Image: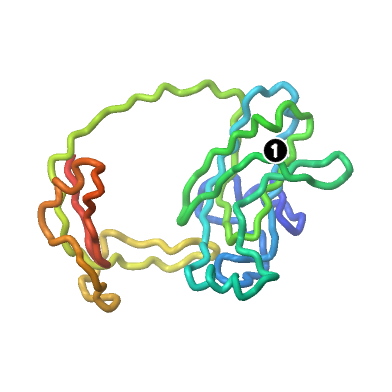
Amino acid sequence: SAARGTDGSDVSALVATADGDFYRGFDRTIVQGLTDEHFLELDLGDLSDAKQVTLFLTGWLHPTDSSLNVSFTDHPTRDAPPAPELQVPDGNGGWRAIETPMGFPGGKTKTIAVDLAPLLPTADGRLRIVTTAELYWDEAFFTVDEPPAEVVSTDLVMLAADLRYRGFSEREPIAPNSPERFRYDRVSTEPAWPPMRGRMTGYGDVLKLLAKADDRMVVMAAGDEIDLVF
């Protein structure tokens, strides 16, 4: 297998392991969350005999914000970033999109699984993940005809739920192409922003509010924390 970037360079080492070293396929950010079109090209090899292939992708998304989403209406030629699109070779030296929604890793670093069964069987296992969203990829790997794993579900009883003010975790230095990360063990109780307005849930026992899905919610403000015991 191999991986290539938008500029044709070999990026296999960048997406070989989930090590926090992210592949960035674009040079220019138009606005936060919107970039020039870019892609990650993967070659999965000959899949002529495969019955089930699952692609696993780890990455993170820097989203547009509310103000930018509204601004798109003032720029008719500027489209909001759509979800990533899967493309495969069209047999004529180009690429064509396939109608297989792949989703995306919403927010900070997450792993998604993409079912590639609609591509099978194929002797040409190349594919592209194309997007204009500000997406960064850390790891890409795939499985072939992997047997399903046994799933065991265990219900746990929530014994306590305590809402309290905690403060704000210290932000780690931002690495290139990496999302913001925070250290939970280092916290400041000093205010970080003006107090939020509204009817917030009072501090203390909130077990009854979280016991079941009944539209009775805990409303938290900046710096709040819920401590749960199961």
Please state the horizontal and vertical placement of residue 158, each as a whole percent of the image.
17, 39
Q: Secondary structure at mark 1?
A: loop
Label 1, residues with CA under 10 Å away: few <14, some 14-19, many ≥20:
few
**Quarter containing the C terminus:** top left
Rendering quarter of residue 170: bottom left
Q: Residue tagged by mark 1? A: 1
- Tell me how the rendering is colored: rainbow
- Residue 206 location, x and y as percent? 14, 51
Q: Residue furthest left?
A: 204
- The quarter of the image holding the N terminus is top right
Apparent side of residue 200 relative to residue 192 in the rendered image (left or right): left
Q: Nearer the viewer, residue 149 or 17?
A: 149
- Check disc 1 and give the amino acid type: Ser
Q: Residue at x 67, y 63 (%)?
A: 26
Query: How many labels were placed on the picture?
Result: 1
Considering only vertical position in the picture, is 65 above or below 155?
A: below
Whether residue 201 sits left or right of residue 116 in the image: it is left
Q: Is residue 17 left or right of residue 170?
A: right
Q: Nearer the viewer, residue 79 or 36?
A: 79
Q: Residue at x 82, y 41 (%)?
A: 90
Please state if 20 lies on the left or on the right of 163 as rendered: right
Q: Residue furthest right?
A: 92
Q: Nearer the viewer, residue 128 or 204?
A: 204
Q: Residue at x 55, y 56 (%)?
A: 21
Picture layout, residue 180 above or below residue 193: above
